[in-house]
Amino acid sequence: MLDWRSIDTVLLDMDGTLLDLHYDNHFWLTHLPKRYAEVHGFDPNEAQQKLETEINARRGTLEWYCLDFWQEKLELDILGILREIEERIALRPHTEAFLNGLQQLQKPTFLVTNAHRQGLEHKLEITGIDRWFDGIVSSHDYGHAKESAHFWGTLREKLEFNPDRTLFVDDNQSVLAAAQDYGIAHLLCIRQPDSRGPKREITDFPAIHHFDEIMALDNSAPNERPA
């Protein structure tokens, strides 16, 4: 599926790509509505409906990903509530082996995420995956979500990559479409970002289930991390 000789730079999404999206889905769809109802005295169904309306209205925008925005909007300690279920944060299968292979091939690799910095740092603290990357970019640093063309122009200025020789992997097809419009040549989508969710039929982009399908090195050690 991939000719690694044609790729110089690798850009990787985090949630749903490297990490199991189950944590985020459980938080936003189940745990947060429950805590929202408890704190503010709402009926659980009412709380669920209120949150769904607010979240759907901002889908694809930077606000949708911004913990500060939701903390103010909902009057809740969002980061504290995120930590209540942090045991659900987990790497997707073959992630460490894949990152190890990229490092052995000396491919500059960057984490490129829409995650808010506070949530990002929390997940890095739990998983330790930051040690695999040459740089970590949150779209909040640039003021535009990855769904925006402005994000990709700024990212290229900062990282100085060649779009024709760059691989970008994400589970969000809207983000992949924005990257495609910008000119990123090598795109991959994740079929099942949530391990407890359905395996999706992806037609607009090449897609994989797990990273072992495109492993950079067959003999990369799945549990080995660089010193």
Image (cartoon, rainbow, N blue to C red):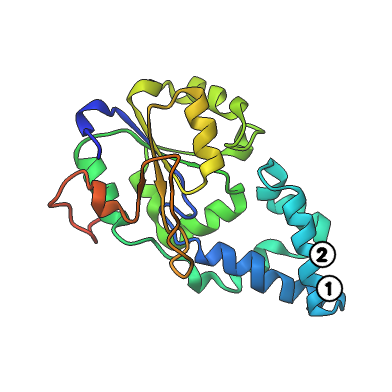
Question: Is label 1 in a helix, a strand or a loop?
Answer: helix
Please provide percent x and percent y for residue 201: 43, 53
Taking the spot 54% from the left edge, 58% from the top edge, the residue there is: 122
Asked if residue 34 lies left or right of residue 210, the reply is: right
Please provide percent x and percent y for residue 32: 70, 69
In the image, residue 1 above or below residue 198: above
Q: Residues within 10 Å of mark 1 (few under 14, many from 20)?
A: few
Asked if residue 222 lies left or right of residue 82, the reply is: left
Q: Which residue is mark 1?
A: 46
- Quadrant of residue 75 within the rendered picture: bottom right
- Quadrant of residue 12 within the rendered picture: top left
Asked if residue 181 lies left or right of residue 50, the reply is: left
Please provide percent x and percent y for residue 225: 26, 54
The outermost residue toward the right is 41
Taking the spot 81% from the left edge, 61% from the top edge, the residue there is: 74
Indicate the amino acid at tag 1: Glu
